[in-house]
Amino acid sequence: MDESLFTETPRFSKGVQLINGLDINRFPKLLTRILQNLHNKAEPAFNEAEQVKLGPALGLTSSELVLVIETLTFICQQAAYHAIKPGILMTQLEAVAINSDKCKAICEGWSAHGKSTIEKLKKHSFAPKQLQSVEWHLNLQLAQDSKSNLKEPNAIFQLNVENNDNDTTLSEPVLLEFNHSQLFNLYNKLEVIQSQLDSLS
Amino acid sequence: MGLVVIGLNFSDLFKMSGIKDHVNFLGYPLPPGVSLLVKSLKKYDISVFERLVTVAVEMSSDTNPTNHKFSNLTKGISKEAINHIYPGVFTIIRKAMRTPKNLLKKNVFENDLNEIMLPTSFHAPLSTALFGDARPSLEDNAHQQCPHVATLSKLRWRVDVAISNASLNRVMEPTILITITTDKGEEHTLEVSKEKFHQLRYSVLEVLNYMQQLEKRSIFQVET
């Protein structure tokens, strides 16, 4: 694609200037950290304490540091959004006047961590309730108060559900009981779903 | 003088001792309602008995029996008759339902009723109730009444493919949305990713496999 990935707002240009001024030795680690945290929108790449230490180490004030982190995050987000190859990323970065050594560092970081970042972003979902794990328990029912001499196998499934409402992650287990025929019906339904999934690929 | 040796095995000794190897389905001692029933039955007509047997079957087949329903069903029967007959009839039906069908056959049932001295003319309504058409609904109700964790009554699903989202232009990731409705009325809507779906499917199959293995074992073949 010929159009630029990055619109050159004044803030973006300032960020680029600051990036160009950074020490190249520290740059890859900074970038790796940002890439690894890209999928985690709730938490920033560097927490407060780390930012306080990082500022002086890079020779930046706290607001300049925030700008640098934001600009780099934006570059990575755009790269992920379009899933661009490192070569094209290089061209795009040079077009916005980032120094070639920084461009190279960014492209190397992207080649190394880009794929895994995209995979993590793909899996990310904000559905309110998600299945986390399945646990089960198989019993043999021998009797109950209204019937004696039973020999019925009975399974209890616990579906651990992660609740994403309001960013609280309380696990809400769903308990279900099945006898043989009920479990078989469930299996048939799951098979239909599986055939749908298979027809997609 | 020689010794005469007689070979006796355990079941011979058992039979000789006069102890029966069959236990009445009502148990010993007789439940108080049943003894009252047997004593008072001479005063009543078979039609009253038949009606009360029907009432007992109706109440036992219902998942939510109410007093209101009972009074509706017993309209026109004297309170005295209900007090004398109903508890015994209800207990007989409950106890007979408890034993599985293959262990309490009709003739054994009638022998047991003879044993407690219930007149033969009164056997017919009870036999038809327990060994006739009403049996499946009685069984279903007995099955439902026991304590259990919620069972699945409905599973609705859909498969979605996410084409793009705010972070990525091209996602192409399938996910499954399922709504589980339990027989206790709870509804849960969950999203299941492909990996978790495979885990779920694997667990279900594993348990089914174990159940089948269990059912093949000898404990199931023996009719105790």
Image (tube, grey):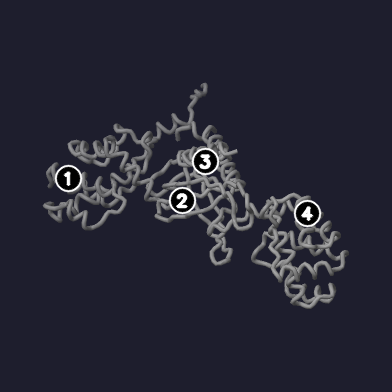
Tell me the distance, in whole angstroms, between the alpha carbons under discs 3 and 2.
15 Å
Which of B197 and A127 lies nearest the eye of the viewer?
A127
Secondary-structure class at tag 2:
strand
Tell me the distance, in whole angstroms, between the alpha carbons under discs 3 and 1.
51 Å
Q: Nearer the viewer, mark 3 or mark 4?
A: 4
Query: What's the mark number on residue B83?
Result: none
User: Is B88 on the left or on the right of A184, as rendered?
Assistant: left
Tell me the distance, in whole angstroms, between the alpha carbons under discs 2 and 1.
42 Å
Residue under label 1, please give it.
B51
Same chain for mark 3 and mark 1? The answer is no
Query: What's the mark number on residue A193?
Result: 3
Q: Nearer the viewer, mark 4 or mark 1?
A: 4
Q: Nearer the viewer, mark 4 or mark 2?
A: 4
Residue under label 2, please give it.
B180
Q: Quadrant of residue A42?
A: bottom right
User: Is B8 on the left or on the right of B165, as rendered?
Assistant: left
User: Is B186 on the left or on the right of A137, as rendered?
Assistant: left
Query: What's the mark number on residue A91?
Result: 4
Q: Nearer the viewer, mark 3 or mark 2?
A: 3
Same chain for mark 2 and mark 1? The answer is yes
